[in-house]
Image (cartoon, rainbow, N blue to C red):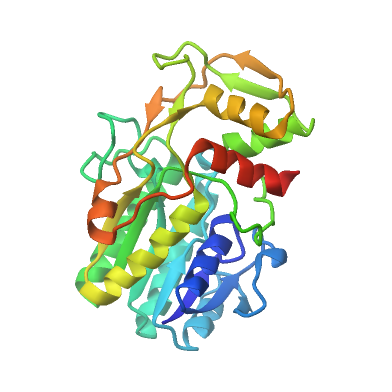
């Protein structure tokens, strides 16, 4: 298939492009390079420098004719979204509607969307599955939930078939070592641990008194290449069955903050000092998902999401 990957020069987007190419699809990347990197582009792909907030630019892209598209062009800093909701409204919601309207206009009716575990909010039970109530506690998660609702309506009214892929904690880098562009302004634990290993920051552990096996928060870290594979498998499912999907993607087990740091110390050979700090408001003790539905429908299972692979592939890029 001819696939347009919007945001394909970014951290997750470049890995999605790589897996789409492996599966034999013809890929064009659409990106404004505000956070995506030219070094993440593959020479064999087409590239369109454009902005989803300029309808004429996204329409011109779809006018080239595509069978499907992947949408990864969103702001994703949960904390910032609570301070600047207008920024997230314009980019995440208005930008997405521009994309969907252009796709429908040019009859590109297969959509893979990077949704988020942030649509769920506080866990009411664990592991969280697709039936878990969606009650986001930050504005970023709210924008992702609204987009899921828009897609459901466009499916009913315009025949736009979609996969909403709710990532838990994306981590790691390309195991083959080809993609080496560092994620810009990362908010997540593993990049911060890498920066601490290189002496670039002081690492803090926010809360060591949680009701977990070592007192630190548990999160579901899933390798970015495993996430990318799920995009390809979802596209092929939609093409075969002509039905939409909403799927949670994780490892079904959690890893603590201390376990990540200990693995990093072992793999990097660095001391990585970490300062214990008070809990952050709104941080649940544990967050992890069931991926049983993704396994049942797609045959998807994580291959690279063990802690050592997550840490090693990240260190290989940082070091």
User: Which corner quadrant holds the C terminus?
Assistant: top right
The N terminus: image quadrant: bottom left
Residue 84, image x, y percentages: 55, 43
Query: Relative to residue 200, is residue 96 depicted above or below?
Result: below
Quarter-wise, where is residue 244 in the image? bottom left
Q: Nearer the viewer, residue 214 or 131?
A: 214
Q: Residue at x 47, y 44 (%)?
A: 305
User: Above or below — where is 1 with respect to 51?
Assistant: below
Q: Nearer the viewer, residue 270 or 184?
A: 270
- Which residue of the protein is positioned furthest toward the top in this rendering? 209
State the residue in front, 277 or 288. Answer: 288
Figure check: 221 above or below 111: above
Q: Position of residue 180 (x, y in %)?
A: 69, 56
Q: Position of residue 247 (x, y in %)?
A: 30, 53
User: What residue do we see at 65% from left, 50% from top?
Assistant: 183
| Residue 45, quarter of the rendered image | bottom right
Farthest right residue in view: 199
């Amino acid at each position: 298939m001819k696939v347009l990957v919007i945001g394909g020069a970014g951290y997750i987007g470049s890995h999605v492009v790589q897996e789409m190419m492996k599966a034999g699809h013809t890929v064009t990347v659409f990106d404004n390079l505000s956070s995506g990197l030219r070094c993440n582009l593959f020479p064999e792909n087409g590239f369109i420098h454009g902005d989803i907030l300029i309808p004429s630019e996204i329409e011109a892209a779809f006018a080239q004719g595509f069978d499907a598209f992947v949408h990864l062009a969103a702001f994703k800093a949960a904390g910032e979204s609570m301070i600047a909701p207008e920024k997230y409204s314009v980019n995440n919601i208005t930008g997405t509607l521009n994309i969907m309207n252009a796709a429908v206009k040019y009859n590109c009716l297969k959509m893979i969307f990077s949704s988020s575990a942030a649509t769920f909010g506080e866990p009411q039970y664990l592991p969280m599955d697709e039936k878990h109530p969606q009650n986001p506690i930050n504005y970023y998660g709210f924008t992702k939930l609204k987009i899921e609702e828009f897609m459901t309506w466009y499916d009913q009214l315009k025949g736009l078939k979609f996969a909403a892929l709710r990532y838990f904690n994306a981590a790691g880098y390309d195991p083959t070592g080809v993609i080496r562009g560092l994620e810009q302004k990362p908010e997540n634990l593993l990049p911060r641990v890498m920066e601490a290993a290189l002496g670039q920051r002081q690492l803090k552990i926010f809360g060591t008194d949680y009701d977990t096996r070592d007192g630190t928060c548990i999160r579901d870290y899933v390798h970015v290449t495993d996430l990318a594979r799920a995009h390809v498998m979802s596209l092929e499912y939609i093409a075969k069955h002509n039905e939409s999907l909403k799927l949670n993607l994780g490892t079904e087990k959690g890893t603590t903050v201390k376990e990540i740091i200990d693995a990093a110390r072992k793999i990097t050979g660095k001391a990585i000092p970490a300062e214990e700090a008070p809990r952050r408001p709104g941080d649940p003790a544990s967050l992890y998902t069931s991926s049983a539905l993704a396994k049942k429908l797609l045959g998807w299972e994580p291959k690279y999401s063990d802690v050592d692979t997550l840490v090693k592939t990240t260190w290989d890029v940082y070091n």
